[in-house]
Amino acid sequence: MIGIRQEHPPSQYKQPKAFKQAIPGVKIYAKYKKWLTDKKTGMVFLDLGDES
């Protein structure tokens, strides 16, 4: 969902109202991302993509 929003910015595309709402769970995912990452390989067990 984050990727779709990044590839289709409001400056170029008409977006539905839902695009202006926060994506549920993103803040919680960001909070616990370091625990979802394998320390040896750096791989994320559950990768939702990054907003940056």
Image (cartoon, rainbow, N blue to C red):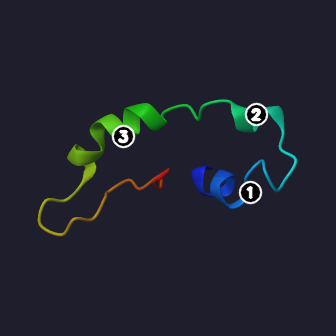
Q: Mark 2 packing: few (<14 Cα in 10 Å), some, or many (20+)?
A: few
Which of disc 2 and disc 1 is earlier in sequence?
1
- State the residue position of label 1: 8
Residue that appears at 11% across and 66% down:
40
Q: Amino acid at mark 3?
A: Ala
Mark 2 falls on what kind of element?
Answer: helix
Mark 3 in CB contact with mark 1 (< 8 angstroms): no
Extreme residue toward the right, this view: 14
Residue at the image point whose x is 47% and y is 37% from the top = 26
| Residue at (67, 51) in percent of width and height | 5
Residue 22 position (above or below residue 39): above
Distance in Å between CA atoms under marks 1 and 2: 13 Å
Q: Earlier in the sequence, mark 3 or mark 1?
A: 1
Q: x%, y% of residue 41?
A: 18, 69
Q: Which mark is residue 30?
A: 3
Residue 31 shown left or right of residue 41 in the figure:
right
Give the distance between the C-alpha atoms of the residues marked 3 and 1, in whole angstroms.
Answer: 22 Å
Q: 2 or 13: nearer the eye?
A: 13
Quadrant of res 42: bottom left
Distance in Å between CA atoms under marks 2 and 3: 21 Å
Give coordinates of residue 46: x percent, y percent. Answer: 38, 53
- Secondary structure found at label 1: loop
Check disc 1: other Cα within 10 Å, few if <14, some if 14-19, many if 20+. Answer: few
Q: Tell me the kind of residue under disc 1.
A: His
